[in-house]
Amino acid sequence: MMLASLGVVALSSCGGVTQINEYNDALKKNFVTSCMNDVRIENKSLRTTELAPESACNCAYRLIKDVYKLSIDDLKAYEQKVADASTGVIPDPPDALNKALADVQQAFGGAQVQGPTATPSPCAAELNPPVDTTTSEAPK
């Protein structure tokens, strides 16, 4: 998994800088979709590289929005830095994005601590989605 570059790819797109004004469903969809796959045109053909599972990308989005509270202004500024960067250069992400990516990396790609002293994963909701245990009776 290439989670280290996940935030950079998720914030950039082939169409250039997007207009971000607030955290909303459209922003989440764009972030998660871009986070999951890197799509490039190479040798006149479309090349897609899988970067991360959807659950990891959902976790990253939730962490930057709800836990580390990356402001929309900081998100927009970083997206602009990514758009302006030379090919192959990755600008330093904001601290909130770095923290979120470190948490996602630990949860999805790093060693998990087991036992009673283990710290709950910040991605527990995405790693262990709730299971519907309700049963329905067949109609009589």
Image (tube, helix red, strand yellow):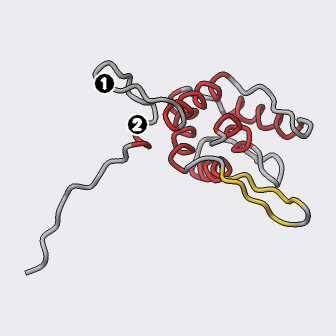
Q: Tell which residue pokes out farthest to the top in this image.
A: 117
Tag 2–tag 1 contact (CB < 8 Å) = no
Q: Earlier in the sequence, mark 2 or mark 1?
A: 1
Which quarter of the picture shows residue 12? top right
Is residue 103 found left or right of 133 in the rendered image? right
Q: Position of residue 107 (x, y in %)?
A: 49, 34
Residue 16 tag number = none
According to the picture, the residue beneath numbered tag 1 turns out to be 115
Indicate the amino acid at tag 2. Ala
Picture residue at 87% right of the left edge, 38% below the top: 88
Residue 124, disc: 2
Q: Position of residue 140 (x, y in %)?
A: 7, 81
Disc 1 marks a residue whose amino acid type is Gly
Q: Is residue 32 above or below residue 123?
A: below
Residue in the picture at 42% in, 42% down: 127
Packing grade of label 1 (10 A; few <14, some 14-19, many >=20) is: few
SS at circle 1: loop
Disc 2 residue crowd, few under 14, some 14–19, many 20+, Cα 10 Å: few
Q: Secondary structure at mark 2?
A: helix
Q: CA distance from mark 2 to mark 1?
A: 15 Å
